[in-house]
Image: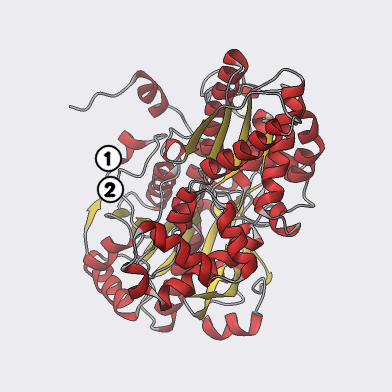
Amino acid sequence: MTFVSPLQKARLQYKPKLPVALRNGVAAVKNVEGAPTQSVADQDRIQALFPNTYGSPQVVFEAGSARPAPAINVGVILSGGQAPGGHNVIAGLFDGIKSLHPDSRLYGFLKGPDGLVKNEYIELTADIINAYRNTGGFDMIGSGRTKLEKTEQFEAGKANCAKLGISALVIIGGDESNTNACLLAEYYQATKAGINVIGCPKTIDGDLKNEFIEASFGFDTACRVYSELIGNIQRDANSAKKYWHFIKLMGRSASHIALECALQTHPNVCIISEEVAAQKQTIADIVDYITSVVAQRAAKGCNFGVALIPEGLIEFIPEMKNLIAELNDLLAHEEKVFADLDQEDKLKFVADKLDESLARTFKSLPAAIQLQLCLDRDPHGNVQVSLIETEKLLAEMVGAKLKAMKEAGTYRGKFSTQAHFFGYEGRCAAPSNYDADYCYSLGYNAAALLHAGKTGYMSSVRNTTQPADQWIAGGIPITMMMNMERRHGADKPVIRKALVELDGNPFRTFAAGRDQWAVETDYVYPGPIQYFGPAEVCDLITKTLELEQA
């Protein structure tokens, strides 16, 4: 028998909150429809690709009178990387369809979308669901990154749903997964398959949101886990007073996690990728900024500090973005010649072939990073940006600049570094009260959308900065979030990622405080997630959401 920790035992008893509209069961929900919607961009092209699901209205749920409803069989899929709260989405969906009719059944497709195509599943019973309530991870049914975008996949899924009497699918995932959910919904509508599809917004990166999806689940918990670790490191730095800690954080496409963790912990340095891109900063500019902070603190006798670096920073630096694109082309065309060279000659070969300005950027990088850019390729021959150790790159380049300053007599401090990457540590944590409540509501709300006959919608629970009595449940068409983007040489319909808004309250609050945090030791130590105790400790919301909704 698997040992269950005391905390998990206690958390199994936690009863998540629900919006008022859902509290009497899905059969009692009344839906109010708004005006037709349109996509965020490329309206004509998106409408042409989704003629059967485009323009559907936004839906808001209100409490109504219960009415008899038939049993429904539903399939659920976890797609993409793990995020805290996924199990509660499934639990909410289960309770929602059971509130419709006790004979409703829920099937979990195993290992992500692949399970739908290969007909690998388990029936999720009350015993299974109850063992996973308020727990982290996706281990109830597993997840995967298979994309549902081909007709043969849609047809295989349709046939497998027919065998189980499934008339609805709920796909729990990020922007790519929900884009696939939209494609699936459109195909099943066009072919009159009788299968409705609903999406739920998941990603710890926080880049799946808009006016109606105010947060992607898992972001709250992951940021609290990372902020606890950052706080612990800041306390250590302030105790030992001898290290600069360079910490890379998740967030390849946006810097929401870095920004939120900075707001929670007040580090000495936090780089925001979107600001770097907007100001067209070079890598030298970033190194100069960090170096100046290190030197200012050293002048005060503080030879320690903490710097937060978003995972995707490299791709936001214009010169590095251009360098990577040029390297991808160069090494694709010169693959055979390059492969026959030894390591030292490889670097010289690349530097000689690059444009003069890009060659200068390339040569300015530490040798280890030069090799990563040249040797670590994905199956398509492109640089694997996520593998570049940006935190070590910046630490080494700052160290080199400080060494030159010391030789010139303009710096007298000491500089020793420690590098960290916080990623997997936050993806499967036990969900915070916020994520436990939010995720359960998203799942229950998905059941209400299915009962209302909706397809191609994303479950939406809003106004979550207020008490649950004021939460707004409903849904928006996924097409409303879409635009056209270039992917693998072709234009594709995708959900637009939400980047950090430089004129938004969260960034402006950060920008107003960072100069003081840079030179002062103004650290905040959030500590671990609290599940029991005063509401002001246990029911916190992220600084990002608090400032956005202020």
**Mark 1 element type:** helix
Q: Quadrant of residue 379?
A: bottom left
Q: Quadrant of residue 280?
A: bottom right
Label placed on residue 189: none
Quadrant position of the C terminus in the picture? top right
| Residue at image point 29% right, 48% down | 141
Question: Marks 1 and 2, how far apart in space?
Answer: 6 Å
**Which is nearer the eye, 71 or 476?**
476
| Residue at image point 29% right, 70% down | 157
Crowdedness near tag 1: few (<14), some (14–19) or many (≥20) residues, C-alpha within 10 Å:
few
As shown in the figure, which amino acid type bears the numbered disc 1? Answer: Ile
Residue at the spot of label 1: 128
Q: Position of residue 384 (x, y in %)?
A: 44, 59
**Mark 2 element type:** loop
Decide: is 228 above or below 124.
above
Decide: is 513 above or below 104.
above
Quadrant position of the N terminus in the picture? top left
Is residue 238 found left or right of 130 in the rendered image?
A: right
**Which is nearer the eye, 263 or 494?**
263
| Residue at image point 21% right, 68% down | 163
As shown in the figure, which amino acid type bears the numbered disc 2? Answer: Leu
Crowdedness near tag 2: few (<14), some (14–19) or many (≥20) residues, C-alpha within 10 Å:
many
Q: Position of residue 482 (x, y in %)?
A: 59, 70
Is residue 433 found left or right of 512 in the rendered image?
A: left
Residue at the spot of label 2: 124
**Which is nearer the eye, 139 or 532?**
139
Cβ–Cβ below 8 Å for labels 1 and 2?
yes
Query: Which residue appears farthest toward the right when viewing the image?
Result: 512
Q: Position of residue 272 (x, y in %)?
A: 67, 47
Q: Quadrant of residue 346?
A: bottom left
Q: Position of residue 387 (x, y in %)?
A: 44, 51
